[in-house]
Amino acid sequence: MNFDLTDEQEQLRDAVRALGRRYGHRYFVAKAKAGEHTTELWEEAGRLGYLGVNIPTEYGGGGGGITELAIVCEELAAAGCPLLLLVVSPAIAATVIARHGTDGQRERFLPGLADGSLKVVFAITEPEAGSNFHRLGTVARRDGDDWLLSGRKCYISGVDEAGYVLVVARTENARSGRLEPALFVVPADAAGLTRSKLDMEIVSPENQFLLYLDDVRVPADALVGGSLEAGLPALFAGLNPERITVAAMGAGTGRYAIELASEYTSTRAVWGGRSIGAHQGVSHPLAHAAIQVELARLMIYKAATLYDAGRDSEAGISANMAKYAAGEAAALAVDTAVQVHGGAGMTTEYGVATLLGAVRAGRIAPVSREMILNFVAQHVLGQDRSY
């Protein structure tokens, strides 16, 4: 087994790391607390080609895969800039459109997604159904050649920055009569589409919204893939990259927290003695957290490699495991970093407590740890379905 990145991937990692460190966590926090977006970082990452690494070259992308995008997500997070919209726009929307969109949809959306000038966000989660697409209440119905979409969505990231929303709705299959998922690319300013910002206890420049769709009319070419049969494959095409890149962001955040904590504990001395890192009560928890983060990283890149190889079933299992492992490891790393800093860990200056909300949310979204355990129990261990 080869655990080495290619030369090109190493160069990408080094370049993204350098970019992230030029901005850093202070920039990230300042933007978040001012209610602003990380526009400068996003635009520069786009100009340098980092936002489109997974998009085919014929549409202006780098021609790589989710492995390369995971590197971008991880390294920016490791520099203290965990950009959630990397998951939503390049990982989910671009992958769905690249793999299952029509030729017209690819030509229309992928170039802007590749250079970052266009953001497409993802709307699946609902107040009653969560992200269970079998139970979605948002429906799409035909009206002549158009579609009308009605329903509600919640916890939708970055709508205020987006040009379009990739909406998951349910439509009736004319042959079977069953309601099946379909994806629509909806302009963010479409008539009948309104939003309400959710106040979150997370320090982030990216906002969360409730969305309301009241007979939102979209043309036939808004249907991803151009047919209802494309809906389910298109949906699954986006979910594994979502889990992998969220996990990469979590692992990067864990690395960032451990790096800060290690620097602090190796230089902080009290009462004329050695550094506080010389005490096992301080160093052992940090070492344990570092091990958990590194184990999560191994699963992340296994999942990304499987996905890029087209081994979707295996990638689905590994992507869920990676998401679980990274969520737990990131939360542990940040909590441990706060603890070893003592009171300083709760200050904005030291840059670790500002990550607490985000890593705690990482154990819930985009799929909760409990649902991942259900998935593994059923699909890996052969247990009866429990829900």
Image (cartoon, rainbow, N blue to C red):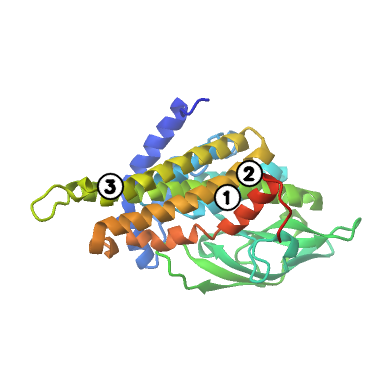
SS at circle 1 = helix
Do the CB atoms of the residues marked 3 and 1 lie less than 8 Å apart?
no
Q: Quadrant of residue 334?
A: bottom left
Task: Kindly report which numbered mark, 2 or 3, lies closer to the viewer in this rendering.
Answer: 3
Task: Kindly report which numbered mark, 2 or 1, lies closer to the viewer in this rendering.
Answer: 2
| Residue at horizontal 69 percent and vertical 59 percent from the top | 168
Amino acid residing under circle 3: Ser
Q: Name the spot of residue 305 as percent of width and height, x first.
A: 57, 34
Mark 2 surroundings: few (<14), some (14-19) or many (≥20) residues within 10 A: some
Q: Circle 3 sits on which residue? A: 283
Describe residue 328's horizontal placement relative to residue 143 as left or right: left
Is 329 in front, or is 202?
Answer: 329
Q: Name the spot of residue 354 as percent of width and height, x first.
A: 35, 62
Q: Residue furthest left?
A: 272
| Residue at horizontal 43 percent and vertical 41 percent from the top | 294
Question: Which mark, residue 317?
Answer: 2
Distance from the alpha carbon under mark 3 to that under mark 1? 33 Å
Mark 1 surroundings: few (<14), some (14-19) or many (≥20) residues within 10 A: many
Q: Name the spot of residue 358 as percent of width and height, x first.
A: 44, 60
For residue 129, above or below residue 183: below
Amino acid residing under circle 2: Ile
Distance from the alpha carbon under mark 2 to that under mark 3? 33 Å
Quadrant position of the C terminus in the picture: bottom right
Mark 3 surroundings: few (<14), some (14-19) or many (≥20) residues within 10 A: some
Question: Which mark, residue 242?
Answer: 1
Circle nearer the N terminus (2, 1): 1
Question: Would you say residue 253 is visible in this rendering?
Answer: yes
SS at circle 2 = helix
| Residue at horizontal 41 percent and vertical 31 percent from the top | 11
Circle nearer the N terminus (2, 3): 3
